Amino acid sequence: MYTKKHTGTSEAVYQKLKQQILHLELPPGSSISEIDTAAKYDISRTPVRDAFKMLESEGLLEIRPHIGTFVSLIDLNTISDILYMREVLEQAVMKDLAVSLDKSQEFRIRLLLQQQRELLDTERSAEELGRAFIISDNDFHYALFELAGKKNVMDFLNTVTSQYERFRTFLNLGGREELMLLYEDHVKIWECISHKDYDKLSDHVSHHLYDGFNRSIDVVYKHPEYFKSFT
Amino acid sequence: MYTKKHTGTSEAVYQKLKQQILHLELPPGSSISEIDTAAKYDISRTPVRDAFKMLESEGLLEIRPHIGTFVSLIDLNTISDILYMREVLEQAVMKDLAVSLDKSQEFRIRLLLQQQRELLDTERSAEELGRAFIISDNDFHYALFELAGKKNVMDFLNTVTSQYERFRTFLNLGGREELMLLYEDHVKIWECISHKDYDKLSDHVSHHLYDGFNRSIDVVYKHPEYFKSFT
DNA sequence: AAAACAATGCTTGTATACAAGTGGAACAAA
DNA sequence: TTTGTTCCACTTGTATACAAGCATTGTTTT
């Protein structure tokens, strides 16, 4: 038998569980025990506990001492606050980028948009396309932050907004047409940046963030057990 | 002997260590071992490890497997990005508050300002006054976020910006006069909110965030060993 | 029948033993 | 002296045993 590594085990478990939670394979509210997870991956409780703690700090797990560990319910109030932060920060960063845009950056953005265009024209299943587009969408936003010199800001945001990703995956039941709307938002945002049209830029950024959610928020009521009760 | 509690131990150690790090009693770059810490508080390595992991996720510790654990150096690039986030988010939140301000909220802010005023008029040592004012300053900002209905946004910010608090403590060598300037900023910010003077409000918020740092940033060079090299 | 209660099996929290990687110190060879 | 090497002390990573809290079930008592 190969000797087991003494680094990276908990990190691997963390990544695996996080993906399962974000993709709703571990649904909100479901229980998950340290012992079972350890047995499943043929490791001890220790690295599993480390992974659990990390996921708890991101708000994806809820550890109740001596009772059990549960995948956290989606809190729509939290989602709302996350959207607010993303809106405000993205508006500011995009504006900064528009102010200092140069030709090489413009080229890079054009390239990303073209990639996205091709993605939408490729035939594949709706679910697969949805996931691929979310990744591409994230790449697009991340690239804009990076070009604006605000990569760390994006990283901070992401550490605190895992909930947002999960909610996005949950709502992602839209077909090619819906995704096309998101792509068109990107094009509009890019046009505003390159034309330095700051007012419209802010509007498009807000619209891009909220519109998809607003359009499909009714599906929330198809899985009320996934959500924390809100009044 | 009393039976040991089976909850809260790691949390207590976490809080204790965090305070020591933020107050620079555990200086940046210094090493801290799990075994020593466990012995110091007469507990086992397990809760200490939990606390270490939490502090690492906040960027206050750097755990190098099989080598050691070190209090992280202050990264001025990170500080810069944190300041950017706080600037953008505070400007937005304060503006929101100004839009919807009512009399009872105005009363609450006046109260906080008066408390701060009294604090500055009380005789005590410079260092103690500095720490007390930082707490009072945080309370003031927190209250404004709360009044704007954005308490969670502030909480998110704080989980990610522990570095900022440490840096602030480090720079806090200013006397009563410097603190008075911060207090006057608060008064100006409040006036802009109550008069709905949005343009000046943003300026004052930015000024309030950056001015203190800019005025005393020279002390950085008195402890270069605390900082990550930057180019 | 209903209510109080004790036993049991689950959970996570803690303590401790062991594994394995790292770096420096002591030491040997050139 | 310099260089290379071996060893050792120290670190964190992992595995596992035990402690203790909670909930459910089944039993006993009223």
Image: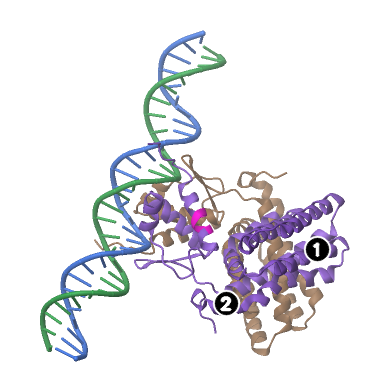
Chain colours: A purple, B brown, C blue, D green
Q: Nearer the viewer, residue A26 or B62?
A: A26
Query: Disc 1 on helix, strand or loop?
Result: helix
In the displayed orientation, state which residue is furthest to the right: A195
Q: Against B33, is B41 above or below?
A: below
Which residue lies under the disc numbered 2? A220
Q: Nearer the viewer, residue B194 or C21?
A: C21
Q: Nearer the viewer, residue D17 or B97?
A: D17
Q: Nearer the viewer, residue C3 or C23?
A: C3
Q: Earlier in the sequence, mark 1 or mark 2?
A: 1
- The reply, left or right, for residue B204 in relation to residue D25 is right
Magenta residues, start to end? A15-19
The image position of residue B80, as x and y in percent, is: 70, 56
- The reply, left or right, for residue A62 in relation to residue B171 is left
Q: Report in which chain the residue with disc 2 lies.
A: A
Q: Report in which chain the residue with disc 1 lies.
A: A
Q: Quadrant of the C terminus of chain A?
A: bottom right
- Magenta residue check for A18: yes
Q: Examine the residues drawn in magenta and state their main secondary structure.
A: helix
Name the amino acid type tagged 2: Val
Which residue lies under the disc numbered 1? A187
- Magenta residue check for B27: no
Tell me what residue is drawn at x 42 percent, y 48 percent: B34
Name which quarter of the figure residue B94 lies in.
Answer: bottom right
Tell me what residue is drawn at x 48 percent, y 76 percent: A225
